[in-house]
Amino acid sequence: MKPVYLNIEEIRMRKGVTKTHIAKKCNRTVAWYHGISIGRRVPNVESLQMIADALEVDVRVFFDNELSVTRNYEKQIV
């Protein structure tokens, strides 16, 4: 399982969004987001939701992709 902060950063970079953009959307400092982006700061649920909103994604995409693959597979079987 990949750490959440790595998934967030992968999504951020894929979307071409800057760290400054996320910090501003979350009404936080760039240092706050930088701490999250390198794994030094662990975001709480509220922070994860704010980051997801800034990236325009569902917060669940930050977590292990294998879970969503498993769920999709189970839906096909039923």
Image: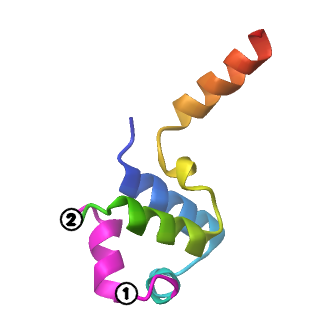
Question: Mark number for residue 70?
Answer: none
Label pair 2/1, CB-CB below 8 angstroms: no
Number of other residues with Cα within 10 Å of mark 2, as a class: few under 14, some 14 to 19, many 20 or more = few
Taking the view exactly as shown, the residue that stands out farthest to the front is 46
Residue type, mark 2 in image: Arg
- Which residue is under mark 2? 40
Magenta span includes 39: yes
- In the displayed structure, 39 sits above or below 69; it is below
Q: Position of residue 10 (x, y in %)?
A: 51, 58
Residue 69: which quarter of the image?
top right
The residue under the point 60% across, 22% down is 70
The residue under the point 29% across, 65% down is 38
Foreground residue among 29 and 39: 29
Could you tell whether 62 is left or right of 38 in the image? right
Q: Position of residue 9 (x, y in %)?
A: 46, 63
Q: Quadrant of the N terminus?
A: top left
The residue under the point 77% across, 10% down is 78
* Residue at mark 2 to residue at mark 1: CA–CA distance: 16 Å
Magenta span includes 67: no
**SS for dot 2:** loop
Question: Mark number for residue 28?
Answer: 1
Number of other residues with Cα within 10 Å of mark 1, as a class: few under 14, some 14 to 19, many 20 or more = few
**SS for dot 1:** loop
Magenta region: which residues?
A: 25-40
